[in-house]
Image (tube, coloured by chain):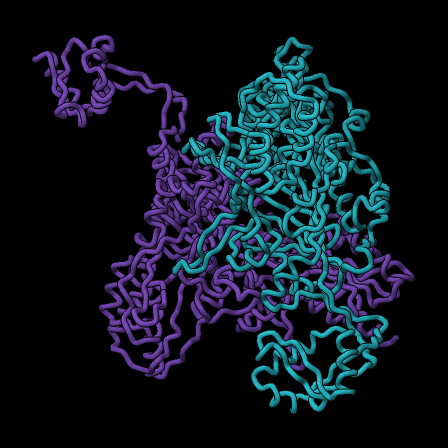
Chain colours: A purple, B cyan
């Protein structure tokens, strides 16, 4: 699976051919192209837009509706303070270095990777081995380093390979050291690039007319969800666990965006924040529904040992063995697997890869990526992170908002402990303006301190307390204003900050990978030009039915219009192609658009009201009256029947192209 | 209709009560509230989010699918050059003025309006007339000017009223003059504010790591659609007319955003760009389908005369009389009307208002707003502008991209005209580096000039041509290098820049107005506390069905789970409320959420498998077996039956609350 990417039918995938087709059919296109374009910004044309909408629709049904998640829609504009607290202002960066001569800016990890890979390739050439060409990698700005066929020591080859296996695990200083250690020069100038420096990936702006409120475009939808936690918990009638979800654009000012949808600066995300009680091992009540599902896993230990070998195991087993930390994380990995399968991902080109420690985002304590294999290698399409209580804790601390769950205990908790009683009437006048600070210092004492203080109060009638910022930093408290006693206390509620499990989907990357996984070419035994087909499953296909009149004959128009209206009423998207091109050409165009079904209206229709139905993948056709064909369409689109079943039910038809020729 | 806003049932609308309810049910909430919030930024909670999704879904079906529009999804990030060309950098501004003492920044038009309205109110008080309190107006930052009961001259009252009627028509200098003329002082300081200056409403940022590409967040989705015009035309197989459409967030850095969804800085838009041939009167092939629809119109002439009287007429009549400029514009006004009706807008609180000349956006040549009446007065919710060929022309001119339609003429056009033939071999050496400029000057000559030149060439053998920038600004061309003749020319294609009709929807404003139009309070003959109800039509209601078990008895759980799954399979959204609150409380909660239907599972269900169905608006119930009830739900949600019909088909049920009391 680390070799060349293939089409749905196992053919070598010719990316330039696919790219030309996607461009021709306007799946997506560089934004502002007539102005020369801008790296990392793409517009979706009609088929891309419909494909995206269908993926999002299935996502919403599979996750939000299936589990009664609370969907929210928060703003992308975010004031500085929130992202300062969340850690993004300080830590949401990539490392970049600069060529000292030509000023070129490069992502440091991509630079190291590119030069090392070029050396390994040169080594292979020198050893006379076959060299595989990888397409440009979304994760890496590769200097197209001219390969020189230079043989390396076996030990060096192994060292380079190990560095590459854990490339995502290096920080800026370590990348800088690798550059020096291996003398990694920019092939364009022959010079070492500058020391890597952190570049914050957020787009900055300012909010309001007086320009005094700095803000950013959100780099993830998560923060808006966290800030609404208390309201969402209340909306959910205080029931735990629960999840919020959000679908919306996020923004990252990538240092070196690549051609294509895989590393862009504005992208659609779908994120779930599932709040779970950190106690009790993060169990999930529906885990049993998925525990026997087999997943392909690449854990961090394997990667740190310099390997990329995956293991296939049921998620039940993985959680049991501790490969996956807990049931809730495991449940969502399984649900992600089922979602990708549902939309038509080739599951032989999918794996879950665990993040290594340094690779992890600053907020995460564990993370698995669902990666899909494409012409650009393995692409991380879904992240599933355990953010622990990180975000709720930092925001609560900063704002004082109680981002916690209060749970009524079934059995009240009896706690025996040292407790402080303050006689406010005496205490207040004693410390005046400092009373609050002294009280806080008292409340903050540990059980051990209290025990000692209690003894001092009994014995000496007073204690001396450290109170930073008050007088000389010390306060003397006498036994007439406070009491410290060892007593029972009954607790009826438990308060805790929930942990967050976050499945986070990059819709654009999923969409692009899905296109590659469903692409293949149809050639007429080598005699015809190969023609592209996108075999999307009907639920995600941009358009479900193509309506073609046999010719531009005016007699066909009313029938086509009627069919179009009926399909619309059934909620099935269709498009009419009444252009003058041949039926074959019109079908080919729609094979490229991934339209699974085609209905033709011909002269026979005018006589006996029958129409034909064509299957995109097999190009076979059936013929029957309108009611039967529309019912077949409905069952194919909702997935209740497949084409073989339809073929067994309705009479075969041999095709109108012949018929045209006869007339 | 300019008096106080009312509920769906004609009750005076108590906005604080509604606001409290919307907050309690988390329809929307100020973004970043735990950080103190930011003006003009709101998050949608679960019911708001679902309501928004349903409005968008109906919009997509009503416009995009119904007319085979080409939907696109373009980036919000937009480089400076595009918005410079489109005119937004120079002209997309509001006028602001500043109080010289306290530094307060105010929108100039809102300031003028507020002070004049306060004076008119004071005049009414002085005359002993009843004064109506308007809620804060989304369009206006009103200084809560303390009203003084000062009587004004009748002529002054009329003058103020006329100024207010055309307040949207003033530019910055005119607003400055009004401030001086009427001595409009800031009530907070008693000072005249500074001269109004333009404040650009776009959020600025920079794209890429080197910060050298300035950009903005788009203020409208339109530009992305225009830039893709040539590709979309090709995708549409060069057929005209056609429309593109886009649903996405846009951004405007409002000077003074108001509380609520009506003037915000980040908002969801749904925009259509319909491209039409400017020749032939902009006819529309489906105009006959809507021509008899009656619309309420307030034209610009009426407003300029200082009045706000509407006229009701069919759109057919309006186009015929020239009130609405052309069929295509009229067709979309009618379609907008039908859309608003479909989602449940109170059509007695709706009007189309035409923009006055100065009010119009810089790109528009005509514009009608669909306005909805709310507690904050008339709110512009949909704009329908004729942008003529403005945008395509400026972008084509700037980039050289051919943003035109080339149409094969059915009958080739034979044109007799004066034509210039240049003998390049002689012409080139004659003018050397200036040859191109001289050639361009020749090509640019008019028919009249050419006729005169032809004569001069024949008679004098040479002509003298104005060529700015070449030598002394004149060029002498002799008859051996050019010929000018009167000849026939056959044109097979016609090239034109299409005009754009743009219906543009502010989804948030529509959503808020829809809430007000569907809100009412239910009181039990004054004995009970009034309870809020949102009577959304089922297709837009956030959730369609509430599922309530009679009590928390475990026996009800499997039945509720089964119903929940069945409804999900039918594509009907439902929510379970198995909290310990009484059935009445649970229904009340869902009346506030606008859930149209409620199903209860009770002890009888366990015996005979029947369930009850409750109608939100009448609170009446029916009882039948599961299959019949689910079929009733389906027909109510898809609109094929109403509650009266269901009541006539299924047995009435008197309510479980009594039943509970009996047990």
User: In the image, residue A235 lies at what x, y percent?
Assistant: 51, 29
Q: Nearer the viewer, residue B634 or B120?
A: B120
- Is B588 located above or below residue B642 in the figure? above
User: In the image, residue B449 lies at what x, y percent?
Assistant: 75, 75
- Is B521 located above or below residue B513 in the figure? above
Q: Quadrant of residue B638?
A: top right
- Is A272 located above or below residue A194 in the figure? above
- Is A94 located above or below residue B420 in the figure? above
Is residue B611 visible from the viewing direction of this image? no
User: In the image, residue B91 lies at what x, y percent?
Assistant: 57, 50
Look at the image and tell me in which quarter the N terminus of chain A lies.
bottom left
Q: How many marks?
A: 0
Horizontally, residue A111 falls left or right of residue A636, namely: left
Look at the image and tell me in which quarter the C terminus of chain A lies.
bottom right
Horizontally, residue B59 falls left or right of residue B252, namely: right
User: In the image, residue B220 lies at what x, y percent?
Assistant: 59, 49
Residue at position x 36%, y 79% from top?
A147
């Amino acid at each position: 699976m680390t070799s060349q990417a293939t089409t749905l039918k196992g053919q070598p995938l010719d990316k330039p051919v696919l790219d030309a087709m996607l461009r021709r059919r306007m799946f997506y296109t560089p934004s502002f192209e007539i102005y020369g374009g801008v790296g990392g910004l793409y517009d979706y044309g009609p088929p891309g837009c419909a494909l995206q909408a269908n993926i999002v629709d299935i996502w919403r049904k599979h996750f939000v509706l299936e589990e009664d998640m609370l969907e929210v829609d928060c703003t992308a504009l975010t004031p500085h303070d929130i992202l300062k607290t969340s850690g993004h202002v300080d830590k949401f960066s990539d490392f970049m270095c600069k060529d000292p001569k030509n000023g070129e800016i490069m992502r440091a990890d991509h630079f190291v990777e590119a030069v090392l890979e070029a050396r390994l390739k040169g080594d292979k050439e020198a050893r006379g081995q076959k060299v595989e060409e990888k397409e440009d990698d979304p994760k890496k700005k590769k200097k197209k380093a001219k390969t020189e066929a230079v043989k390396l020591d076996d030990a060096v080859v192994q060292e380079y390979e190990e560095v590459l296996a854990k490339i995502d695990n290096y920080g800026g200083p370590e990348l800088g050291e690798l550059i020096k250690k291996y003398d990694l020069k920019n092939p364009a100038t022959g010079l070492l690039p500058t020391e890597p420096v952190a570049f914050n990936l957020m787009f900055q702006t300012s909010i309001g007319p007086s320009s005094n409120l700095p803000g950013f475009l959100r780099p993830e939808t998560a923060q808006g969800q966290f800030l609404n936690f208390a309201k969402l918990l209340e909306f959910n009638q205080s029931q735990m666990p629960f999840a919020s979800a959000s679908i919306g654009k996020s923004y990252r000012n990538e240092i070196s965006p690549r051609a294509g949808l895989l590393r862009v600066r504005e992208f659609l995300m779908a994120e779930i924040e599932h709040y779970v009680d950190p106690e009790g091992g993060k169990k999930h009540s529906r885990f049993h529904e998925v525990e026997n599902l087999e997943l392909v896993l690449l854990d961090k230990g394997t990667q740190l040992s310099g390997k990329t070998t995956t293991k296939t195991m049921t998620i039940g087993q993985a959680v049991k063995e501790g490969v996956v930390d807990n049931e809730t994380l495991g449940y969502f990995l399984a649900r992600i697997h089922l979602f990708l399968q549902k939309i038509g991902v080739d599951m032989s080109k999918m794996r879950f890869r665990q993040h290594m420690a340094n690779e992890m985002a600053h907020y995460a304590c564990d993370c698995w990526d669902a990666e899909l294999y494409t012409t650009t290698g393995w692409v991380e399409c879904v992240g599933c992170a355990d953010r622990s209580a990180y975000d709720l804790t930092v925001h609560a601390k900063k704002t004082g908002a109680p981002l916690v769950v209060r749970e009524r205990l079934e059995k009240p908790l009896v706690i025996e402990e040292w407790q402080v009683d303050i006689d406010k009437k005496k205490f207040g006048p004693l410390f005046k303006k400092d009373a609050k600070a002294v009280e806080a210092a008292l409340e903050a004492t540990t059980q051990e301190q209290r025990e000692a203080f209690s003894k001092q109060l009994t014995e000496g009638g007073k204690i001396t307390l450290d109170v930073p910022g008050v007088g000389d930093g010390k306060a003397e408290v006498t036994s007439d204003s406070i009491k410290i006693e060892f007593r029972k206390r009954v607790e009826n509620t438990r308060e805790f900050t929930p942990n967050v499990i976050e499945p986070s989907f990059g819709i654009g990357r999923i969409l692009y990978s899905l296109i590659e996984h469903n692409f293949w070419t149809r050639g007429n035994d080598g005699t015809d030009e190969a023609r592209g087909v996108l075999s999307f499953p009907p639920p995600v296909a941009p358009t479900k039915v193509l309506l073609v009149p046999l010719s531009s004959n005016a007699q066909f128009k009313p029938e086509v219009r009627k069919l179009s209206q009926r399909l619309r009423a059934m909620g099935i998207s269709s498009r009419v192609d009444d252009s003058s091109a041949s039926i074959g050409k019109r079908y080919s165009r729609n094979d490229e658009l991934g339209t699974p079904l085609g209905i033709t209206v011909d002269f026979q229709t005018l006589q006996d009201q029958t129409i034909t139905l064509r299957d995109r993948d097999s190009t076979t056709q059936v013929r029957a009256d309108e009611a039967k064909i529309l019912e077949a369409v409905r069952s194919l689109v909702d997935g209740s029947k497949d084409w073989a079943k339809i073929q067994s039910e309705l009479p075969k038809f041999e095709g109108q192209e012949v018929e045209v020729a006869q007339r």
